[in-house]
Structure formats: C-alpha cells, structure tokens
Amino acid sequence: MGNKVSVGLLGLGVVGSGVIKIIESHQEKLMHQLGCEVQVKSVLVRNPEKQRDVNTDRTFLTTNPDDVLNDPEIDVIVEVMGGIDEARQHILNAFKAKKHVVTANKDLVALHGKELQNAASQNKCDFYYEASVAGGIPILRGITDGLSSDRIQQVMGIVNGTTNYILTKMDNEGMSYEDALKEAQELGFAEADPTADVGGLDAARKMAILGRLAFSTDVDLEDVEVSGIKNIALEDLQYGNQLGYTMKLIGNANFSNQQLEVEVQPTLLSKEHPLSDVKNEYNAVYVYGEAVGETMFYGPGAGSLPTATAIVSDVVALIKNMLLGVTGNQFVEPYFKKELKTPAERLGQYYVRLHANDEPGVFQAISSLFNQFGMSFKHILQTPLEKHGLAEIVLVTHQTSLENFHNILEELPKLDGVLEIKGHYKVEGDAEQ
Ligand code: HSE
C-alpha cells in the first residue's frame, strides 16, 4: 500500500459527494492517524456530465465498473450507489479482486449481509457498513467494540428520521399525518417515495442489522415483525399523552434465554424512557447490557456529511487493519443458533381503544374477558362519545404475553355491547418491564 491508500467510489450522489469532501478536508487528521495519505482515485457514475455538489476532476469519473473494481492501485471500494442487485454484484467482484469494501447500503446488508460477509472473509477482506444504520451515529462500533465485553439484552431504536419527524409534528402540533409527511418532504427529510419509511421497512432493515451484531446471531429481514405509522389516529396520541406516553416508531430487539424477538411498530413509549425525548428527524439507539445497564446513542440518522463520516471512519478502521495485517475479521461472526420466541414467550404491555355501548354490564364483560386471560389493567379511561349511548374506552394492560393480547383482540369484538376496536399499540418503557 506504500504511503498512499487509494479508494474507489461506486456512486457519486449526496453521500458519495460527502465522502469526497471529508477525505479531502480531513487529510491532516487521516495522515496523523494512519501515517499515510488517503485518496479517491476513481468514481463509477452513470452520467459523467452531470453537475454535482462537489468539485471532482472529471478524469476520475468513469462509467465502466472495471476501471474501479479491477484497478490494482485501488485497495478500498466504497459503495454508495444504492439498490440491490448491481451493488451486490460489484461488491462480490471487489472481494474477488481482494479489495476491502465499505457500504452505506442497509437494504443490501439486511438482505445479503451474510453472503457478503462470507465472501469478504474467504478473501481475507474487510467488509464494514457503519453508515447503514442511523447515519452518523457510531452505533455498530458502539455495540461491537464499545460493548464487546458485555452481554446485550435489548436494543431499542428510533432509526427512521422521516417517521420520527412526522410523529413529532403530530404529537406536538396536532398536525395530521398527511400534512406532517408533506412538510417532511418539503424540508428534504422524507424521500419523494416514502413507502419504505412510513411502512416501517427501512427501520426493519436497520433492526435486522442491529440484532445480528448485538446478539451474534443470524437475524433475517423476515424475522422482523413490521408495522408502519400510516394508520395512527391523533386520538391515540392524545390519550397516550394523557396517560404519560408518547407515540414513536420503535424498533425493538430482545434476546433472552438465547431466544430472539425483533419488531418494528408504532409504540406508546413512557415519557420516562430516554428515547421519548428524541424528536424531529433525529435518531437514537438505546442499548441495555447485562453489566453496563442503560446506554443511549443519539445523533443525525441521515444527511451527506453525517453519513460520510461513518463511511470514512470505516475506511480508517480497515486501513488500520491493513497496516496491522489483520484484515478479514468482520464486525461479528454468528455465535448463537437463531431461535425465535413464540407469541407465548413474548412479553409486553398493550394499549387498546374501543367503542362500546354505555350501558350496565358492558365494562364488566370486558373486564371478565381480560381476567379470563390472566391480564390486569394498568390504566382505564372511559369517555362518553358525542353520539348518545356510546362510550370510548381506553385500556392499558400490565405485562402479559403477545399470545394473550392476540386472544383479546379476537374475542373483544364478539362481546355484547362492544362495537369496534379503534386502535391498539404496544406500550414500552414502563417501570415494570
Ligand atoms: N430514509 C431514512 C430515514 C434515512 O428517514 O431515516 C436513510 O436511512
């Protein structure tokens, strides 16, 4: 590698431009840390003529992947082109050519991380993807280095900025979902097509990656139970507030008795929980370790320079490995065989809002049903509805199993006097958990 390490970039969009800016403007620090220069040597782009927000010598730009992947002077490939199939093929080709790879591509890592990691190890290459989860927050290294001595039991994250922005606006300003989404798009926080964000898939991909690294077990995307924020009613945010909860899209990964559960869903989070103060487009990941207890990592989950910071830190880490001759060791190797918890083993508190006839015996029937499944209430609210003779009932349970709660959702509408379940959510962060 001599006194210079050459980097090849695949893609030159918002994040790729940030990578060039950071490498150029942080040369002195890079030289101090590594004792060598780091240089971007060539960049794969679709259209070399396109105007970009970084000044790049056009001779660096190429439309031929071989110019980057098979250049013997290039040691490190940074993939920031996005997408799945083409990016996967380029990365596999890079490993065949014995080049180390850094990517920000969470979709790819969540779907093909295992295959890519194996290909990297077989070729004694490094494969790092710090930027794929929560942008500028160094959470993957926080888990795999900072907390490597502990047994992590829980990882809870607000790992999608778009949905956190929307929910903050709905909660603080009573804005409708549609207006909040429109504002997020106008401010550039939300994608033109926000389907993966509001549907929870973006957060699910990040939680699959976090679960793998935190618990040293294979977590596949299909192991993550996902629901998004599209159908949240303002009433549920308001009742939640009244009871001391705030609505957040929470990714929650738990590991106990070597059994795993990973879910992403709108959650009523206790205002006592540290994640409840994470507002607007910010991200945060709460990690509970058996020895360390509670920790939380907070910061920008997206954006050109924050994301590029994580990428260039990966480049620094792998150059240090190259200097020491220890490449080919990945963030973590799976250690535990994957075993998912059953609904009977998954514990939680639950919120349900329903409409019922406001007449004798109805609440008693509801209460008996919960009692039949061994569930008791933490909070009960009843309000008469404008329509005469009807009541809105809000219940929050103490801890119970998901199986019990599913049974309740199935049986409640069958009770005489119960008209409709209007909303139901998991509750997190109460002291009893
Ligand atoms: N679309 C993501 C978000 C950013 O809203 O957080 C990139 O992961």
Image: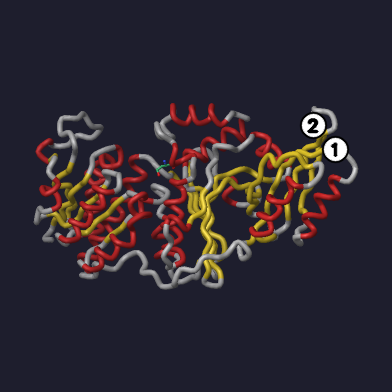
Query: Where ligand 1 lies, by quadrant?
Result: top left
Name of the residue lying farthest toward the right: 360
- Secondary element under disc 2, as helix, strand or loop, is loop
Percent position (x, y) of residue 66? 11, 49
Residue 67's tag is none
| Front one among 385 and 131 | 385
**Left or right: 164, with 174 as reference point:** left
Q: Disc 1, disc 2: CB below 8 Å? A: yes
As drawn, 220 above or below 46: below
Residue placed at 44% from the left, 72% from the top?
336
Q: Residue at x 23, y 60 (%)?
A: 319
Mark earlier in primary sequence (1, 2): 1
In which quadrant is the C terminus drawn?
A: bottom right
- Kindly identify which numbered label has been placed on residue 358: 1
The kind of residue on which mark 2 rests is: Leu
Pointer 2: what residue? 385
Task: Give how far across and how far down residue 53 sits, in percent.
Answer: 25, 32
Q: In the rendered view, does 82 fall on the left or right side of 95?
A: right
* Residue 430 appearing in the image: no
Of residue 94 and residue 272, the one placed in the foreground of this image is: 94
